[in-house]
Amino acid sequence: MGIDFDQALHILCLGSPEQVKGLQWALDHHSPSRRHYKIYRAQLQDIRDHYQNYNFIVVLLDLGQPVPIETLRDVAQSRDGLCCFIQPTPGQLLALSEASSWGAMAWDGVSFDEISNKIEQLVRQNEDSIHRKAFLDSATTWIKKRVGAVGQLQLLNPPKSWSGFAFRTLDRSEGLLSLGMLDSESSWKLPLPGSGDICELRHFDGKWSVKPLSRDVPVEVKGDMENLRTGDHIMIGDLKFLVGMDPEVEEIYSIARKLSIIGDETIHESSDEPRVAFSASDLESYFTSLLYSQAVGEVQVRSAHRRALIYFNSGVVSHAVSGAVSGLKALLRSVLWTDVEWSFTPDQEHSEIHDTMKLSLLGFTRSVQEARKLLKNVQPFMPPPSVSLLVDPAVFQTKVDWGVAEARVLASVAEYSLVRDVLNYCPLPDMEIYDTLISLRKQGLVKPIKTIARRNA
């Protein structure tokens, strides 16, 4: 037995006013369940900004018109939905394969009862995830309201002689933290020159501020000294400090990011240097820190003879290239390499020439998670890049049902044969190609070409 919704399920519909009215009427009069639906109309240019406020998306598409691939990709990452295709061609269906997480159906443009029944079916299948998304939306709102609140101070470059903690919680009830040589509950004893306090962090009327107390040691703030915010930097002599959020909120926020719950929140970051956690030891964590800190610039990645360039632009991965491949394919390759080295070059101005993709933190995290999951499954069966493959025409003629990935990979095998070339020229991500090749091999559709040893004349 399914879970009953306490209130109407809110649906955002991309279609004409007449189509929205027809669909609402069909759901009101022909819905086989007692569930209530409320449909809201959106235009293509509005759907990106409003889909988060709804439980389900319905897109009525005449594929003879331009298909909003980027829009569907973004929306499909966060919401369940249904695409209704009016007279689609095989090429157009193939172009929409990246929105495969949605339900799909052919539609004649007038039979709204068919859409109503399909919506009921998809909601019944996905109502647990719809409830979960509603809860996560509420949790996300809670987190976003608190990530900007100042809660701790982090010592970024402790000297070798420093044996204390790198973090100090800022207690609002205490209202004062002295930095210097005094050893008391309200001060943080640091290896600073002089015999007295250098500066104070004061909390008043909901704001933290910095007040220098000594002229002998310079105190600088990259941010607003009278109103510190998460991400601000404080320089006391040669020591660098980072103003951070509450430890509890940071822990919850970190978990939310790892689970892909949080994505495109705006966090104040006054420094040109990206914030990197002390525990960040792999490239994925470093990329996450660049997206989190809204960095602008390029990362050069090296692994043995392999190279990749990844471009970041204020919270998104805007472009990636590695050898013959680019885009998401190149990005995932670099993240999955082992024994990597990398360097970041910040740019003050970003060139739109490299804006070929706009992958947010949420999209990046999910893409990497999916790739790692596939890698774990396919790694024992991956064919070597130097192996040549052959399509078996006899088995090909007997296969009836074709998936999009199967058709793409098989076409690449027929054209290029070599596994290395299939990986480079098939547009799918590498792990999905490997997974599909393994499936095609099990079906007998592809097989390795046996090399015949030459005899001496």
Image (cartoon, rainbow, N blue to C red):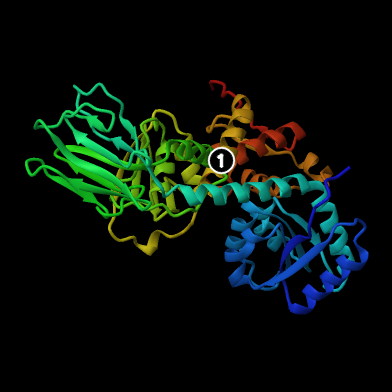
Percent position of residue 431, x then y: 58, 38
Percent position of residue 246, x then y: 42, 40
Relative height, residue 41 to residue 254 (above, below)? below
For the C terminus, give its image quadrant. Answer: top right
Percent position of residue 300, x then y: 34, 43
Name the residue located 85 percent from the left edge and 56 percent from the top edge: 120
Name the residue located 86 percent from the left edge and 69 percent from the top edge: 112
Name the residue located 10 percent from the left edge and 32 percent from the top edge: 193
Percent position of residue 153, x then y: 31, 38
Q: Secondary structure at mark 1?
A: helix
Q: Amino acid at mark 1?
A: Asp
Q: Is residue 210 visible?
A: yes
Residue furthest toward the left?
216
Q: Nearer the viewer, residue 55 or 371?
A: 55
Q: Is residue 338 left or right of residue 415?
A: left
Q: Nearer the viewer, residue 446 or 109?
A: 109
Q: Is residue 104 left or right of residue 147?
A: right
Relative height, residue 307 to residue 51 (above, below)? above
Q: Is residue 385 left or right of residue 121?
A: left
Name the residue located 21 percent from the left edge and 36 percent from the top edge: 179
Q: Nearer the viewer, residue 251 or 442?
A: 251
For the N terminus, give its image quadrant. Answer: top right
Give the mark count.
1
Packing grade of label 1 (10 A; few <14, some 14-19, many >=20) is: many
Q: Is residue 326 visible?
A: no
Q: Nearer the viewer, residue 11 or 14?
A: 11
Q: Is residue 318 left or right of residue 261?
A: left
Relative height, residue 132 to residue 385 (above, below)? below
Q: Which residue is mark 1?
A: 430
